[in-house]
Image (cartoon, rainbow, N blue to C red):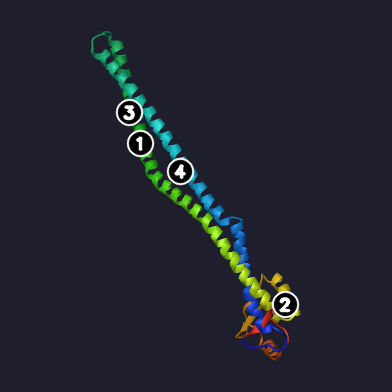
């Protein structure tokens, strides 16, 4: 880095900028952790999976109940068919019209039984599908619960690390600022507030690294001759020659 003799500390502005950006990142991450953003996301995942597992179990229970109901109805129909067929063949009914009526009743019962048996098969297929989906969901839920527990512990550890890093960076900044002209620091702070935390930028190969615009040849020549505070003609950030 070249020395800038015109303004005290101008050659150290990028160092200050790097420290401040590091502090900004640490503070933003600390805020995320204190707000529990990571924990919130993990908890929402657990809750979503719990809901899916609960719905699947409820659907499975409903299928079981419906299957048992249908099977009971099939058994009832089989008993009725058996009773009607005994009346049809045991000689207890002699009237031809009554015998014909019994025959029609038996046929109707068999058709009804066939339809219900199809419904039973449908319920069995649905049950197999639900049973195949439930174990993976339960495994995913168990993993999500474990992750939620881990994140809670990891968040506390990370907060401790961030606290130490912030303290170190704050000490570095406090030691650096007195080496920089007070008016330059004030300008830098104003620019940081306006420019998303970046008040000073390197000038490399004629390009401002703050806005990535290439300065005009005339402006470049003027900046190189200047011993005062150099600023980008586009974004107005403080420029440091490197």
At 42% from the left and 35% from the top, the residue drawn is 61
> Which residue is disc 1 drawn over?
124
Q: CA distance from mark 3 to mark 1?
A: 15 Å
In this view, 24 is above or below 11? above
Residue 197 x, y percent position in the rendering = 66, 71
Label for residue 53? Answer: 4
- Expressed as whole percent of the image width and height from the top left, the position of residue 41 reads 54, 54
Mark positioned earlier in the residue sequence (1 or 4) = 4
Say if residue 124 shows up in the picture.
yes
User: Which callout, 1 or 2, points at the residue further toward the start of the chain?
Assistant: 1
- Quadrant the C terminus occupies: bottom right
- Helix, strand or loop at disc 1? helix
Q: Secondary structure at mark 2?
A: helix
Question: Depth-wise, is mark 2 or mark 3 nearer the camera?
Answer: 2
Q: Which residue is mark 3?
A: 114
Q: Is residue 58 above or below residue 99?
A: below
Q: CA distance from mark 1 to mark 4?
A: 20 Å
**Residue at image mark 2:** 185
Closer to the camera in the image, 237 or 218 = 237
């Amino acid at each position: 880095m070249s020395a800038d003799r015109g303004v005290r500390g101008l050659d150290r502005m990028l160092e200050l900028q790097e420290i401040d950006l590091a502090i900004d990142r640490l503070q933003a991450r600390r805020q995320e952790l204190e707000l529990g953003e990571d924990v919130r996301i993990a908890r929402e995942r657990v809750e979503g999976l719990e809901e899916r597992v609960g719905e699947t179990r409820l659907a499975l229970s409903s299928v079981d109940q419906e299957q048992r109901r249908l099977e009971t109805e099939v058994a009832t129909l089989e008993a009725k068919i058996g009773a009607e067929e005994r009346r049809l063949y045991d000689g207890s009914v002699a009237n031809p019209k009554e015998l014909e009526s019994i025959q029609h009743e038996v046929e109707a019962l068999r058709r009804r039984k066939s339809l219900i048996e199809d419904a039973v098969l449908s319920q069995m297929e649905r049950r197999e599908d639900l049973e195949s989906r439930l174990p993976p969901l339960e495994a995913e839920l168990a993993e999500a619960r474990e992750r939620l527990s881990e994140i809670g512990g990891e968040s506390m550890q990370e907060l401790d690390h961030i606290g130490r890093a912030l303290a170190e960076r704050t000490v570095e900044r406090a030691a650096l600022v007195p080496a920089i002209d007070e008016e330059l620091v004030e300008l830098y702070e104003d620019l940081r507030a306006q420019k998303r935390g970046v008040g000073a930028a390197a000038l490399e190969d004629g390009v401002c690294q703050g806005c990535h615009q290439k300065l005009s040849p005339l402006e470049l020549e003027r900046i190189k001759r200047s011993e005062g505070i150099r600023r980008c003609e586009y974004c107005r950030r403080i420029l440091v020659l490197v």
